[in-house]
């Protein structure tokens, strides 16, 4: 008996998996596993199907027609009209045999085809049948062949879950069925048992039985229609590559079912990736950066995108305001044209944007005269002509986007620090925790502390470029504030790509600092995360589709224990014992000291460790006092 249980949260399903797997109930050992279902588009991965292909016995016949017009009409009719369950292939024939005034050759006719039945292709002048090319004088009907297939599968009925046959009409006599089984191992055994057999009740033609894998997506009609053109193009590419790979789209009225199937896991994964890319659309980029402007949130910007849609009906343009991206769906060539128009609009807007920074006359004059920290430095940073110093109005005019404005504030702040030139109120206590100077273009955090916009922006960006503890915190009041900086603050200040980078860095740090709970998929370049589980439980990666042992974190090894698979680890442990190598007290990662002091930081979980006694510390400050008190120095 197989029972499926649905949980509202992945963590709850995983807890049930660990509790049930291997447990003795009802006189047997339970086997539990989690299905591979994506949160979006309802993806289901199947590894328990056998695809069975065979060629039905068929006839080739020559038909005579009174004139060429009737013959050509018969050829056209053959493309649309099946003879019973078979779709034939007809061509004009010159040479021997010649039947009637104009001869048409029909291929892949059913074995019972006769002159009366051939009248569906118009009035003819006679029929001549070729020798039967692919039968041993047997004449099974479609019903006979399906009954025969069921007899072949009878020994495996206890393991079989379902049997589905391809509906007629059958093109070129090709028949196909899919048999589903309880486990992947059962499917593999049945495929080997049936492959290459030639049963007489199926016309004595060779059976090709393959253990195939399939991925099924359920997609809303609205989402499918956006990407329909690109999906049809992918469907054609999959068909043309051969090898038995298919991408089948089925209209279920309220949604679409897309089934991708084939044998090789790597090819299947590639097709899956291409399909998801077509389904989710193309994000507009310019020189590697996501293209976005607040203009698209305004009525004028929305009108601009709507006009583009009307001009190019083959492309769907979808602005995603929460992610600050624009996604394009549809024909690749038209997408490229629309993409360039959007990029051109954003570039023109940025070149027209301007910001005014007011100055007092003393700062303005000094900024104009200082060659080492003033106007020349700003022009070098922004480019000639993008910064104008108006000495009459005492203001700095910046041409460009918000990044250009932030850069100008940064240069101006550095100039003020150099000359200790602050605005009135500079000594009122409103100092930036980063530069310890007057707050320029202030950003006030929920904790109450204000930062220079450029300083906070730089702090957030640098967090992705070096080892950083997350969550990022405010350093106000002599670095003692410690209140986390909210995500909405980072999102309001950073570009989409920079914001994504900082979220990814925080996520990666969380994974690395919880090595006992989370692991990356062992496939190179696969970024999927999974939870550790007791020995004997494997999982299917929803991205690259390989099966993983969740205990020893390698490829699944059904029938073998983790220790049997990893006997080679003894060689590594022998090397460890003979060299100056220790294990991280938290994640057990091997650590080797080559030089420097005894303050070690684990590259995996970021734990601070004393190399001498392996004591651990929350941060790197307390460890130096410990080394001095306990070991008489830092070990340099």
Image: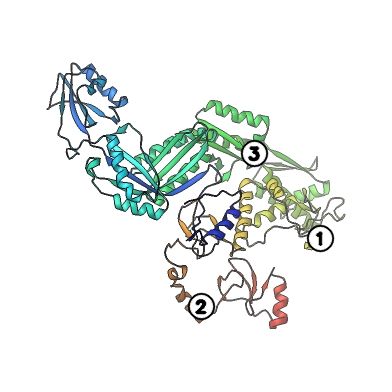
Q: Is residue 35 left or right of residue 559?
A: right
Q: Nearer the viewer, residue 53 or 155?
A: 155
Q: Nearer the viewer, mark 2 or mark 1?
A: 2
Tell me the distance, in whole angstroms, between the alpha carbons under discs 2 and 1.
46 Å
| Residue 511 on image: x %, y % | 60, 60
Q: Quadrant of residue 474?
A: bottom right
Q: Is residue 542 left or right of residue 632?
A: left
| Residue 111 on image: x %, y % | 21, 32
Q: From this view, report whether residue 396 is shown above or below residue 128.
A: below
Q: Nearer the viewer, mark 3 or mark 2?
A: 2
Q: Nearer the viewer, residue 374 or 110?
A: 110
Element at badge 1? helix
Residue 202 in view of the camera:
yes
Tell me the distance, in whole angstroms, between the alpha carbons under discs 1 and 3.
36 Å
State the residue at coordinates (32%, 50%): 155
Mark 3 lies on residue? 321
- Say which label, 2 or 1, has the lower sequence index: 1
Q: Nearer the viewer, residue 596 or 203?
A: 203
- Say which label, 3 or 2, has the lower sequence index: 3
Q: Which numbered marker is on residue 576? A: 2
Q: Is residue 298 left or right of residue 131?
A: right
Q: Quadrant of residue 61?
A: top left
Judged from this view, the residue extending furthest toward the front is 27
């Amino acid at each position: 008996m197989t029972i499926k249980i649905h949980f509202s949260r992945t963590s709850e399903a995983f807890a049930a998996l660990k509790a049930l797997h291997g447990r003795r109930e009802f006189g047997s050992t339970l086997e539990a596993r989690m299905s591979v279902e994506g949160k979006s588009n309802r993806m289901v991965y199947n590894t328990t199907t056998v695809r069975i292909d065979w060629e039905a016995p068929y006839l080739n016949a020559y038909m005579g027609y009174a004139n060429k017009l009737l013959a050509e009409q018969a050829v056209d009719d053959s493309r649309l009209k099946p003879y019973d369950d078979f779709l034939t292939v007809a061509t004009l024939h010159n040479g021997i045999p010649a039947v009637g005034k104009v001869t048409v050759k029909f291929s892949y006719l059913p074995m019972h085809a006769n002159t009366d039945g051939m009248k569906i292709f118009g009035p003819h002048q006679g029929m001549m049948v070729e020798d039967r090319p692919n039968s041993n004088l047997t004449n099974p009907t479609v019903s006979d062949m399906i009954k025969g297939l069921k007899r072949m599968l009878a020994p495996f009925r206890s393991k079989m879950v379902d049997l589905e046959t391809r509906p007629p009409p059958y093109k070129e006599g090709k028949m196909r069925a899919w048999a589903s089984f309880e486990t992947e191992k059962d499917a593999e055994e049945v495929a080997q048992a049936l492959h290459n057999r030639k049963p007489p009740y199926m016309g004595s033609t060779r059976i090709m039985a393959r253990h195939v894998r399939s991925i099924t997506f359920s997609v809303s009609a609205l989402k499918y229609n956006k990407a329909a053109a690109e999906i049809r193009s992918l469907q054609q590419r999959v068909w043309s590559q051969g090898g038995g790979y298919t991408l089948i789209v089925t209209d279920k009225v309220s949604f679409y079912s897309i089934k991708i199937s084939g044998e090789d896991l790597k090819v299947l994964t590639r097709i899956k990736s291409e399909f998801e890319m077509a389904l989710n659309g193309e994000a507009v980029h310019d020189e590697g950066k996501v293209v976005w402007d607040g203009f698209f949130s305004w009525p004028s910007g929305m009108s601009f995108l709507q006009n583009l849609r009307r001009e190019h009906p083959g492309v769907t343009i979808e602005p995603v305001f929460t992610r600050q991206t624009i996604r394009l769906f549809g024909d690749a060539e038209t997408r490229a044209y629309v993409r360039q128009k959007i990029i051109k609009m954003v570039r023109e807007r940025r070149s027209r944007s301007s910001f005014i920074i007011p100055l007092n006359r003393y700062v303005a004059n000094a900024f104009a005269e200082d060659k080492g920290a003033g106007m020349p430095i700003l022009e070098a940073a922004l480019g000639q002509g993008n910064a104008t110093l108006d000495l009459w109005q005492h203001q700095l005019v910046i041409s460009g986007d918000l990044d250009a404005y932030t850069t100008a504030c940064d240069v101006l702040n550095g100039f003020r620090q150099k000359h200790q030139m602050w605005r009135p109120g500079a000594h009122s206590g409103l100092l930036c925790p980063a530069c310890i100077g007057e707050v320029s273009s202030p950003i006030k955090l929920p904790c109450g502390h204000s930062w220079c916009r450029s300083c906070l922006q730089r702090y957030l960006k640098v967090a992705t470029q070096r080892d950083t503890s997350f969550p990022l915190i405010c350093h106000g009041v002599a670095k003692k504030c410690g209140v986390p900086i909210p995500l909405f603050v980072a999102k309001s200040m950073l570009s989409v790509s920079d914001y994504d980078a900082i979220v990814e860095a925080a996520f990666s740090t969380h994974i690395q600092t919880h090595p006992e709970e989370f692991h990356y998929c062992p496939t190179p370049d696969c970024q999927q995360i999974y939870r550790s589980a007791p020995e004997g439980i494997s999982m299917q990666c929803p991205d690259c589709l390989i099966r993983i042992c969740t205990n020893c974190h390698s490829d699944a090894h059904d029938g073998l224990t983790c220790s049997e698979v990893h006997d080679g680890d003894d060689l590594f442990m022998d090397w460890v014992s003979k060299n100056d190598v220790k294990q991280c007290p938290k994640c057990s990662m091997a650590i080797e000291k080559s030089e420097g002091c005894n303050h070690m930081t684990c590259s995996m979980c970021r734990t601070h460790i004393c190399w001498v006694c392996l004591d651990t510390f929350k941060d790197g400050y307390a460890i130096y006092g410990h080394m001095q008190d306990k070991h008489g120095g830092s070990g340099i």
